[in-house]
């Protein structure tokens, strides 16, 4: 967003949300901390369609294989694009619509205890005709190769390496100043653009280290309002109407969101869309702008029941 396009109240990285009702305007003053507004959603994903899709994508033996993690991230990206409130954040008692659609995650060079970790940020091109699936696959390949093959370290870690050499009183003073700048959206671009807590989705793939978990907290620093935990793949029984069942591959997604960015019905619609994309991953071959049906049709009584929960 150029300076000419920015209006009063906008930030460098986001536009001020100007369509809020009075409750959502007031909420950041009543509950100002992101960690006080965590809503946790858990979804068990049937991987049958995803596994079949990956097998087809890898049939041509690409140099960098397609994976479950990539499909999940592409589905999350498509969901956020079509459900733009999921890309909002609250900062400085105001709600903003983020300009970019981005992922943050940790890339470990080797799967050993003392291996170096690198923080990575992957930005999606929302206007491109390249599909979310191929975008994420290609961009992730470049990041992984730069870290594991070329031993590249992220700039955020470089900055933290400097801070750890400073005396505690000076570090506290600097961080205090940064918190004030963060409140007003004035953190220098050199710091914020490489900060993983300034992304749309911070995602961790615990399944890759054979670990199961379904929750990760948010943080008050930065702008990240959506944290996703990808669990370990396992076999799960799926029951038919006659009581019989079959075992299928499944995994659990744990999603923590800042509940101030939308309401329960909006979150439910977003989960419904995500579920459809993972049940029909071929939809991820279409550009971001291609719509996907996901509507939840509730009666007034049903809607009241959802809100009561």
Image: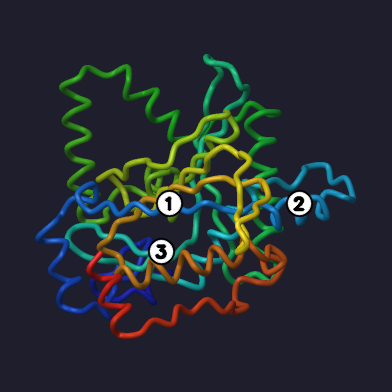
Residue located 57% across and 37% down the image:
232
The local crowd at label 2, few if under 14, some if 14 to 19, many if 20 or more residues have their Cα within 10 Å, is: some
Mark number displayed over residue 196: none
Could you tell me residue 223's position as x and y percent?
A: 33, 53
| Mark 1 or mark 3, whichever is nearer to me | 1
Residue 163 lies left or right of residue 112; in this view the side is left
Element on which disc 3 rests: helix
Which residue extends farthest bottom?
300
Cα–Cα span, label 2 and label 1: 23 Å
Could you tell me residue 97's position as x and y percent?
A: 36, 68
Cα–Cα span, label 1 and label 3: 19 Å
Residue designated by label 3 = 87
Cα–Cα span, label 3 and label 2: 27 Å
- Quarter holding the N terminus? bottom left
From what the image shows, is residue 10 above or below residue 36? below
Name the N-terminal-most of marks 3 and 2. 2
Tally the numbered discs.
Answer: 3
| Mark 3 or mark 2, whichever is nearer to me | 2
Element on which disc 1 rests: strand
Residue designated by label 2 = 54
Residue located 61% across and 39% down the image:
234
Mark number displayed over residue 42: 1
Residue located 66% across and 45% down the image:
249
Name the N-terminal-most of marks 1 and 3. 1
**Color encoding of the figure:** rainbow
């Amino acid at each position: 967003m150029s300076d000419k396009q920015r209006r009063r109240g906008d930030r460098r990285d986001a536009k001020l949300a100007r369509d809020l009702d009075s409750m959502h305007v007031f909420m950041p003053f009543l509950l100002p901390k992101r960690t006080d507004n965590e809503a946790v959603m858990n979804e068990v994903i049937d991987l049958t369609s995803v596994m079949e899709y990956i097998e087809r994508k890898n049939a041509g033996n690409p140099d960098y294989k397609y994976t479950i993690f990539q499909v999940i991230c592409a589905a999350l990206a498509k969901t956020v694009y079509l459900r733009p409130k999921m890309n909002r954040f609250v900062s400085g008692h105001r709600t903003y619509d983020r300009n970019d659609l981005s992922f943050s995650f940790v890339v470990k060079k080797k799967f050993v205890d003392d291996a170096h970790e690198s923080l990575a940020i992957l930005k999606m091109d929302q206007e491109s005709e390249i599909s979310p699936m191929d975008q994420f696959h290609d961009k992730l390949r470049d990041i992984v190769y730069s870290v594991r093959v070329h031993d590249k370290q992220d700039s955020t870690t470089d900055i933290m390496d400097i801070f750890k050499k400073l005396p505690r009183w000076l570090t506290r003073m600097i961080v205090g100043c940064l918190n004030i700048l963060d409140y007003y959206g004035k953190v220098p671009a050199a710091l914020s653009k490489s900060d993983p807590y300034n992304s749309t989705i911070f995602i961790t793939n615990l399944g890759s280290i054979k670990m199961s978990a379904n929750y990760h907290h948010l943080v008050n620093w930065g702008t990240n309002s959506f944290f996703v935990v990808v669990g370990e793949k396992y076999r799960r029984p799926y029951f038919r109407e006659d009581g019989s069942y079959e075992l299928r591959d499944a995994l659990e997604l744990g999603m923590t969101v800042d509940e101030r960015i939308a309401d329960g019905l909006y979150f439910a619609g977003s989960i419904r869309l995500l579920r459809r994309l993972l049940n029909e991953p071929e939809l991820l071959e279409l550009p971001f702008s291609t719509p996907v049906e996901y509507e939840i049709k509730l009666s007034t009584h049903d809607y009241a029941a959802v809100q009561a929960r």
